[in-house]
């Protein structure tokens, strides 16, 4: 699911030069188009997660992927910029429950001391999907056009949704319990540990959405590549990141073995991995593909490892584990809110400066802020419901 989700997103960034040319878009307008799916994605993170807790992962997973896959197919038919943006908004609606669903499935199936590596494996779908989407998208765009690329990837998602619906066993949902309990947002907001999870996720997501939206274009401008080369080099970086992130996830589980996870021991792994992810601040100093691609791969790998450990940290600390989907959705509402800014801000910075230098310096500083928050804040259990005394 995660691979298809990010493969579809990569197809837009790879095809964006052709799309921008067809629709006569400026760099700033390109940034708005690249961020358009985040508008609905951001708004619906929490509502879709609440639906997930009530309905279950089997139905929501199949419906979500089918919806965003139809949006890809409709995007291939769009004749105007507003129509194309509308299909991206529809895609964001479909993708909204993805990470809440992933965290809920891992919490249900993985042993407690394997959650970090399993969440990292799930999040590995980001670089694998972006690599596949960049490589396959570049080939399809170069040979058949961006519209064919969109419709082909949309068809793949429809196949996945049918397979998921037919094969995934349904887990017990909150709806099937004696009564349905809604999470208490004020209770969560009073929890410093909750903010200690939210802030690192926000900072990492800013970098994620920047790279997801602009990386093929960055490759083309920095290394002076053509469309096929930029897609291939982007795929190399993401595949390297996927391989390293799995090893990082396993190493992270080794580091916390024997430590009290319910007290936030995993926060040290989150901090360390985000510090390593901030190495992307060195990218403006590199002009060789042989150095730039490994540096990108390492940075993205530890970003994936850090966010995977951070989501596992949320599962460790949350007392009302049956509401994990909803709490993850609320966490992602904040992190995707910051993520919306990244493609747009990048577009304006590039339009003003003509290069990506300041973009990476700012992003590295943001990631380091997340590392500091992860190290010092999430130390106590997170409650999603008020204490009985508060209710009385």
Image (cartoon, helix red, strand yellow):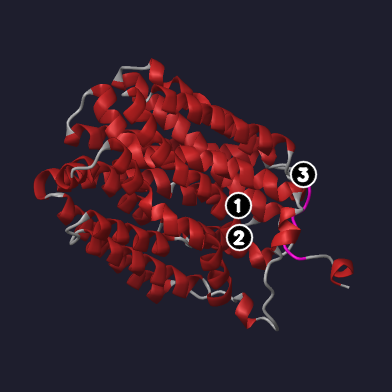
Q: Give x and y (percent) for residue 62.
A: 40, 71
Q: Give x and y (percent) for residue 308.
A: 55, 46
The foreground one among 302 and 110 is 302
Residue under numbered circle 2: 107
First of labels 2, 3 by sequence position? 2
Badge count: 3
The foreground one among 364 and 315 is 364
Q: What is the CA distance from the residue labelled 2 to the residue labelled 3?
A: 20 Å
First of labels 3, 1 by sequence position? 1
Is residue 142 shown left or right of residue 37?
A: left
Which quadrant holds the C terminus? bottom right
Q: Quadrant of residue 290?
A: top left
Which quadrant holds the N terminus? bottom left
Residue 115 badge: 1
What residue lies at 67% left-to-right and 78% top-to-bottom?
180
Q: Nearer the viewer, mark 2 or mark 3?
A: 3
Asked which secondary structure carries label 3, the reply is loop
Asked which secondary structure carries label 1, the reply is helix
Asked which secondary structure carries label 2, the reply is helix
Q: Residues within 10 Å of mark 3 (few under 14, many from 20)?
A: many
Is residue 266 shown left or right of residue 223?
A: right
Residues at discs 3 and 1 in contact (Cβ within 8 Å): no
**Prevailing SS of the magenta stretch:** loop
Residue under numbered circle 3: 379
Q: Give x and y (percent) for residue 235.
A: 30, 38
Q: Give x and y (percent) for residue 71.
A: 29, 63
Q: Does 348 sit above or below residue 325?
A: above
């Amino acid at each position: 699911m995660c691979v298809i989700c990010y493969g579809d997103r990569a197809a837009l960034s790879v095809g964006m030069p052709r799309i921008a040319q067809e629709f006569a878009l400026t760099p700033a307008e390109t940034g708005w188009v690249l961020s358009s799916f985040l508008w609905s994605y951001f708004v619906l993170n929490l509502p879709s997660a609440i639906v997930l807790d009530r309905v279950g992962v089997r139905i929501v997973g199949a419906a979500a992927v089918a919806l965003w896959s139809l949006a890809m197919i409709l995007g291939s038919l769009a004749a105007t910029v507003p129509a194309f943006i509308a299909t991206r908004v529809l895609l964001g609606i479909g993708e909204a429950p993805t990470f809440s669903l992933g965290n809920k499935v891992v919490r249900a199936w993985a042993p407690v001391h394997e959650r970090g590596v399993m969440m990292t494996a799930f999040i590995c779908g980001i670089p694998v999907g972006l690599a596949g989407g960049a490589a396959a998208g570049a080939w399809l765009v170069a040979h058949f056009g961006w519209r064919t690329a969109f419709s082909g990837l949309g068809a793949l998602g429809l196949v996945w949704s049918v397979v998921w619906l037919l094969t995934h066993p349904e887990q017990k949902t909150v709806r099937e319990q004696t009564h349905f309990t809604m999470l208490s947002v004020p209770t969560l907001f009073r929890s410093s540990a909750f903010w200690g999870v939210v802030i690192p996720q926000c900072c990492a997501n800013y970098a994620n959405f920047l790279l997801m939206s602009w990386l093929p274009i960055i490759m083309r401008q920095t290394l002076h590549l053509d469309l096929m080369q930029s897609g291939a080099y982007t795929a190399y970086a993401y595949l390297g990141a996927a391989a390293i992130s799995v090893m990082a996830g396993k190493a992270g589980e080794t580091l916390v073995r024997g430590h009290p996870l319910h007290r936030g021991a995993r926060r040290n792994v989150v901090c360390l991995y985000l510090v390593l992810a901030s190495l992307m601040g060195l990218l403006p100093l590199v002009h060789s593909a042989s150095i730039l691609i490994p540096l990108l791969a390492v940075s993205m790998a530890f970003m994936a490892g850090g966010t995977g450990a951070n989501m596992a940290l949320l599962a460790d600390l949350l007392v009302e584990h049956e509401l994990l989907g909803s709490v993850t959705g609320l966490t992602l509402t904040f992190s995707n809110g910051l993520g919306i800014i990244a493609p747009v801000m990048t577009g304006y910075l590039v339009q003003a400066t003509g290069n990506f230098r300041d973009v990476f310096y700012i992003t590295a500083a943001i990631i380091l802020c997340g590392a500091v928050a992860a190290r010092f804040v999430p130390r106590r259990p997170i409650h999603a419901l008020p204490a009985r005394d508060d209710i009385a």
